[in-house]
Image (cartoon, rainbow, N blue to C red):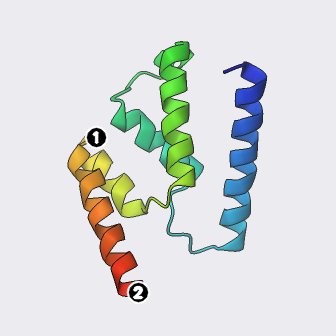
């Protein structure tokens, strides 16, 4: 993915995230910063210099974009940080989502 295309995509996502944040002060979804933290924990990146590696940066960007565009909740982000990227957190999130959706119908 070219740098310009990646920049435009991230710019659009950032504007969307800011708009959503302004529209709802009590936002249940994670912020862009929380999504970045989630990506770093999930990939077990503890040295910011690794973000200079294009392959690593692409992986981080992909997770951040997914985090911002998927209705993740803050509980998932906290769980991943507590359990150091455990996949069980994602399973628990999916279970919560299933229950939430089933109570709607």
Could you tell me if residue 83 is visible in this image? no
Instruction: Report the disc number at residue 85.
Output: 1
Where, quadrant-wise, is the C terminus in this rendering? bottom left
Seen from the viewer's position, the closer of residues 68 and 40 is 68
Q: Of callouts 1 and 2, which one flags the residue occurring earlier in the amino acid sequence?
A: 1
- Disc 2 on helix, strand or loop? loop
Q: Residue at x 56, y 51 (%)?
A: 68
Residue 42 location, x and y as percent? Answer: 35, 37
Residue 26 location, x and y as percent? Answer: 57, 75
Q: Residue at x 72, y 67 (%)?
A: 22
Query: In the displayed image of the protein, which residue is found farthest to the front?
Result: 105
Mark 1, Cα crowd under 10 Å, few <14 / some 14-19 / many 20+, is many
- Against 35, is 10 above or below? above
User: Pointer 2: what residue?
Assistant: 105
Residue 78 location, x and y as percent? Answer: 34, 55
Question: Along the horizontal axis of the image, is 102 left or right of 49?
Answer: left
Foreground mark, 1 or 2, reads: 2
**Cα–Cα span, label 1 and label 2:** 32 Å
Could you tell me if residue 101 is visible in this image? yes
Seen from the viewer's position, the closer of residues 93 and 25 is 93
Question: Along the horizontal axis of the image, is 76 left or right of 91?
Answer: right
Question: Along the horizontal axis of the image, is 47 left or right of 58?
Answer: left
- Disc 1 on helix, strand or loop? loop
Say which quarter of the image contains residue 58: top right
Residue 72 location, x and y as percent? Answer: 44, 58
Where, quadrant-wise, is the N terminus in this rendering? top right
- Against 101, is 7 above or below? above
């Amino acid at each position: 993915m070219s740098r310009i295309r990646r920049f435009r995509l991230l710019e659009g996502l950032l504007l969307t995230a800011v708009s959503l944040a302004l529209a709802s002060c009590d936002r249940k979804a994670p912020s862009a910063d929380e999504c970045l933290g989630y990506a770093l924990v999930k990939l077990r990146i503890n040295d910011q210099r690794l973000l200079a590696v294009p392959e690593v940066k692409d992986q981080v960007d992909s997770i951040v974009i997914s985090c911002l565009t998927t209705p993740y909740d803050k509980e998932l982000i906290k769980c991943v940080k507590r359990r150091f990227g455990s996949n069980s957190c994602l399973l628990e999130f999916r279970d919560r989502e299933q229950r939430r959706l089933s109570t709607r119908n």
